[in-house]
Amino acid sequence: KYSNFLYLGRKYNFPIALEGALKIKEISYVHAEGYAAGEMKHGPIALIDKNFPSVFVVPKDSVYEKTISAIEEIKARGGKIIAVATEGDKEIAKLADEVIYIPKTLEMLTPLVAVVPLQLLAYYVGTGKGYDVDKPRNLAKSVTVE
């Protein structure tokens, strides 16, 4: 349905946002950008509309309120929100269009739990489009050193 995605996270979850964007590009052939949620106002915010969904990694952690603020900025501009959030989070359910819940864990371990739903999202988008996700095109399985 969508041809572009914005993946956002803060602190430990910023690299997971990058990984989520990379995976959906690699196996679903959809344009996606991973961005630090705190830097969203410096570029990506200009692209937000109802056809450009944002995927947030937003667990209940030390930067939760700041991440919620970024979500509210996108909602104010008509953007769609897909959230990967801590189970039991009632606030995110009011803001996001879709929520994928993950179990609560230590803040520094959250990325290990949050990456799985992002990988599955890429998998289901790819298979839903009829792609063989086990054989992505133009993707090298190893790094070549020159």
Image (cartoon, helix red, strand yellow):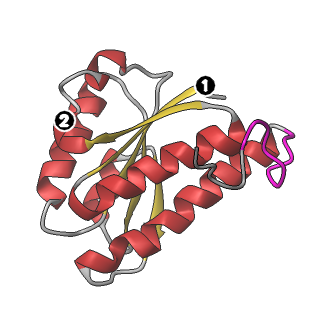
- The kind of secondary structure element at disc 1 is loop
Would residue 8 be found to the left or right of residue 117 on screen? Answer: left
Circles 1, 2 touching at the beta carbon (< 8 Å): no
Secondary structure found at label 2: helix
Across and down, in percent, residue 6 comes to 42, 35
Write down the residue under mark 2.
Answer: 39
Q: Name the residue under label 1.
A: 3
Q: Does the magenta stretch include residue 115?
A: no
Give how far apart the Cα atoms at labels 1 and 2 are.
22 Å
Residue at the spot 21% in from the left edge and 32% down from the top edge: 73
Q: Where is residue 111 in the image (x, y as percent from the top left)?
A: 38, 69
- Considering every residue shown, the one lying at the far bottom of the view is 105
Residue 81: quarter of image: top left
**108 lies left or right of 81:** left
Q: Is the magenta stretch mostly helix, strand or loop?
A: loop
Q: Residue 46 versus residue 87: which sits nearer the camera?
A: 46
In the image, residue 134 lies in the stretch drawn in magenta: yes
In this view of the protein, which residue sits in the foreground, 105 or 93? 105
Q: Locate residue 49, reporting x and y percent.
A: 40, 19
Q: Residue at x 72, y 54 (%)?
A: 141
Question: Hey, what amino acid is under mark 2?
Answer: Glu
- Residue 116, quarter of the rendered image: bottom right
Q: What stretch is highlighted in magenta?
A: 130-139
Q: x, y (%) of residue 36?
A: 26, 43
**Quadrant where the C terminus lies?**
top right
